[in-house]
Each structure stands twice: as structure tokens, then as C-alpha cells.
Amino acid sequence: MASLPLTRDLIDDPANYRLALMIAPDAIDVVLRRVVGEAEPITAHIALQQGVDYASAVEEAVYANPLLPAQLFNRVDIILRPERFQILDAATAADAEAIEAIVQLIHDDATPPAPVVCAVCADLSVVALLPTQVARFLRRTFDQARLLSHLWPLASYFGRQSRQGNCDKLYAVIHGANLDVLAFTSAGLVAANSYRCPDINDAAYYVLALAKSLNLNLETDHIIVAGDSPLRASLLAVLRRFAANALPAIVPADASAVNAPLHLQILPLCE
């Protein structure tokens, strides 16, 4: 993992690199991959200042690392993990009036958040609710970036993996206090959600509750766990008390940036 701040002299021509960011309420994770020639990815974890306006914290974190803003990278992908989001069917997510009604219904700020619609798969989209100043800053600073939901790389990668074998599969990805869960049957992606889980038993509860709500068979269907190694092992230990096939996810050897969240590790495998 690179030392901070990230400075322009860490790379040669930005056009030889792809930048991927994951922006969460408490941190920005960074992966820079070289697309011309071979080199180890550059990874970094930038903690956001707490107790200040979130938009100001994001801007300060980006500008404190001069490598990030206003460079002509080969590609920029920004994965959004907001505090608030809504999962919708694709038709509703494409209806501007429906999105406006949802924002008015669920927001509790004096200034309504900016909805950013990100497809997860053909049938589902995530509406990420960002503070307006954050959304404007990202679009202004990274004007050519793709804005992606944190669930998109998981749905893309595990969706392909789920087609192996004949059983239904539930995937759990744990990163810090964040848990993402996705379930796949023969019909494809049938459920996806995220939770804050400061305790590993909370994470196990959400996984097993989703399995029960979908009528998964804990004797024959698979629960596959990925994410931070120590937390993954702890979660598996709890799940194995209830599920016969609680298994660790196998990330291919060609996935890199092992110090980054799984969402950024597998991003090149989701093309």
C-alpha cells in the first residue's frame, strides 16, 4: 500500500493507468493499475476527516493527494458506497419522476440529496443518494468517470460464478463493518442489499435471514463468503454452525490489488 500523500511522481504518463476509487462515508480507497506494460497496482486507503461536512472531507482528501484530480487517466471508475441508497427495478430507476418522489419520501435533510442511478444488472438498479455538493464535485473533478454502485462489481463477478453447479448461491462480502449480500438462483440475481454490522454475529444474522426469506436449503445450497480475511474466517465459523455448505470465495490469481476492498480487486474481471 502506497504512502500518503499520493503524488504525481508515482507514475509516468497518466494515460497508461486506470484509476479506480471507492468512496464510502469514512474513507476513499484507491487502486491505480497500469494498462500499458506490467507493474504492481498502486493501492491506498485515505481516511476521511470526521466531524466536518462530508463534502468538505471528500474534497480535502482528493486535493491532498495531487495524483488523483484532473489527470487524463486511461479510465476512471468511481464506486459509490453511500450511507443511503435504494434498490429499484430497472423501469422505476429509469423514471425521473419516480426517482424524485423517492428522494422526497426518504430524505431528511434541508437540502435534498442528489440521486445517482447505477445499474446493478439488467433488472435492478441502485439509486445512490449523495450530498449534492459531493455529486457535483465528483462530476466536476472526474468528468469522464463511470459512477458505479458498490453492488455492481459483486453482481457482475459473482453472477458469472453462480452459474457453476446446480444449486442456489448466496454471497456475503464483509469489509470492515460493511456487509454486502447477493443471492442467485437459476433465474439470476434475486436479492441484493448492504448492512452495517459492527459485530460478526449481526453479519451472520443478516446472511441467514436472507437465506431463510428466499427458502434456500442450508443443507444443499451454498453460502460463499468473501472480503477481509480475518472477518471472513470469523463469519464462516459462525455460519458453519447452521449451514452445511458455508465456503470461502476463491478470487482468481489474476485479480490483484490485494490490499484494496474486494470491489476494487475484481473490477478488471467485470468488463
Image (cartoon, rainbow, N blue to C red):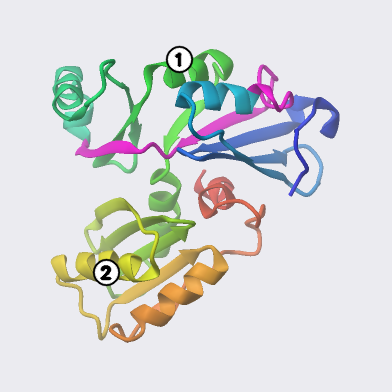
Q: Residue at x 34, y 42 (%)?
A: 120
- Residue 69 location in percent, x, y? 66, 21
Q: Residue at x 54, y 16 (%)?
A: 143
Query: Toward which corner of the image does residue 13 lie, by quadrant?
Result: top right
In front of the other: 156 or 71: 71
Amino acid under disc 2: Tyr
In front of the other: 118 or 8: 8
Q: Residue at x 40, y 59 (%)?
A: 198
- Residue 95 location in percent, x, y? 18, 22
Residue 42 seen in this snapshot = yes
Amino acid under disc 1: Arg
Residue 77, magenta (yes or no): yes
Query: Toward which corner of the image does residue 19 lie, by quadrant?
Result: top right
Residue 249 seen in this snapshot = no
Q: Of tags 2 and 1, which is closer to the observer?
A: 2
Q: Marks 2/1: CA distance?
A: 37 Å
- Image check: 23 left or right of 209? right
Secondary element at image label 1:
helix
Q: Residue at x 17, y 71 (%)?
A: 212
- Image check: 69 left or right of 78? right
245 to 145, vertically: above or below:
below
Q: Which residue is mark 2?
A: 205
| Part of the protein shown in magenta | 63-89
Q: Which mark is residue 136?
A: 1
Q: Which mark is residue 7?
A: none
- Residue 50 location in percent, x, y? 51, 35
- Residue 106 location in percent, x, y? 18, 30
Q: Residues within 10 Å of mark 1 (few under 14, many from 20)?
A: some
In front of the other: 131 or 99: 131
